Structure formats: structure tokens, C-alpha cells
Amino acid sequence: MTRSYSSVCINKWFRPVASLAEMRREGLAEVAVGLHLGGESLGTAELHIFGKGNLHTESVHLRNQFRKKGHGLPFYKELIFWARKLGARRLYSSVYLNRRSRRMWRDKLPRAGFIVKEAQFSSTCYRCKAKSKQTRYYIELCPTST
Ligand SMILES: [Zn+2]
């Protein structure tokens, strides 16, 4: 059976968001993404503007009863879909990775066909305000960029 997921990408006024340019124009550092399946809300996540024209995932949460049921990868695919649609060049991983999210970036996304790279990155997220250099995973969303 094919599961048909859907998702929404909204700003803090619960309105759909069209692009990174629109986020900047409205002074938004982040958007929220909600994952749905069969009318049920499975979980939520944030996408933060990060560096020049990039986004990073944050607070990716599946509701308790929907964990460990194979919804994680579809959720990340939706996040990648939205990051690309908003016009981001790269999608970076969250500030802090736990065992599950690290496994997602390191094992599951590559196995699903995504080219996941690693880089030391000095954070410039206005939302997280993390200062330290961190190793982050990321995916190139625009195939022509280097
Ligand atoms: Zn952030």
C-alpha cells in the first residue's frame, strides 16, 4: 500500500509561504512544516534561514504514537521538497542531532538516493543564534551550484 503524505509550510501567521525572498521581505527567520497522512497530523518541524540562501531543519518531531512506524524518511522528504520549493540552495541538518536524526542524515537519506555531505559550519542562524563551529550534514538542492 502506498501511503500518501501531504504537508503544509506556513509562517507564524499560519499563512502559506512562497519563497525565501518572501520570508526575508517579511522579516521571518523560520517557517513551520506540518506532516499529514489521511487527515491526521503526524508531526511538525521548522525550517530556519541559515547563511546565504540556505535553510536548516530544526525541532523535527513526530507525535508519540507515530514514531518508529517508518514516517521519518517521508517527513524528511517533505522537508527537502519544501526547502527546494522555497528556493534554498542547501538544506542543512539541525543544530543538535540525536541518535535518530543523525542516523537519518548519515544512513537513511543516502540510502534513499540523496547525496548527503558534511561540512564544518559557523552558524549564522538568527533564530538559533548558535555561535560555535559545528559539523553539519547538508544536501545540495540546486544541482548546478557547487
Ligand atoms: Zn536555526
Image (cartoon, rainbow, N blue to C red):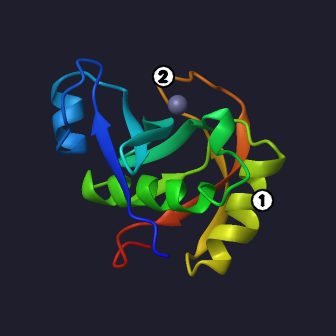
- Say what amino acid the circle numbered 2 marks: Arg
User: Residue most toward the right?
Assistant: 99
- Say what amino acid the circle numbered 1 marks: Arg
Residue 61 position within the rendered picture, expressed as x and y whole percent measured from the top left: 60, 36
Crowding near the residue tagged with mark 1, few <14, some 14–19, many ≥20 C-alpha atoms within 10 Å: few
- Using residue 135 as the reference point, say whether residue 109 is left or right of it: left
Residue 13 position within the rendered picture, expressed as x and y whole percent measured from the top left: 23, 18
Whether label 2 lies within 8 Å of ligand 1 gets the answer yes
Residue 142 position within the rendered picture, expressed as x and y whole percent measured from the top left: 35, 70
Q: Residue at x 46, y 23 (%)?
A: 126
Name the image quarter holding the C terminus.
bottom left
Q: Residue at x 50, y 44 (%)?
A: 56
Secondary structure category for the residue under label 1: helix
Residue 73 appears in the figure: yes
Who is closer to the viewer here, 4 or 27? 4
Residue 101 position within the rendered picture, expressed as x and y whole percent measured from the top left: 72, 50
Who is closer to the viewer here, 73 or 95? 73
Q: Answer above or below: position of 128 versus 5.
A: above
- Give the residue number, with chain letter if any, for mark 1: 103
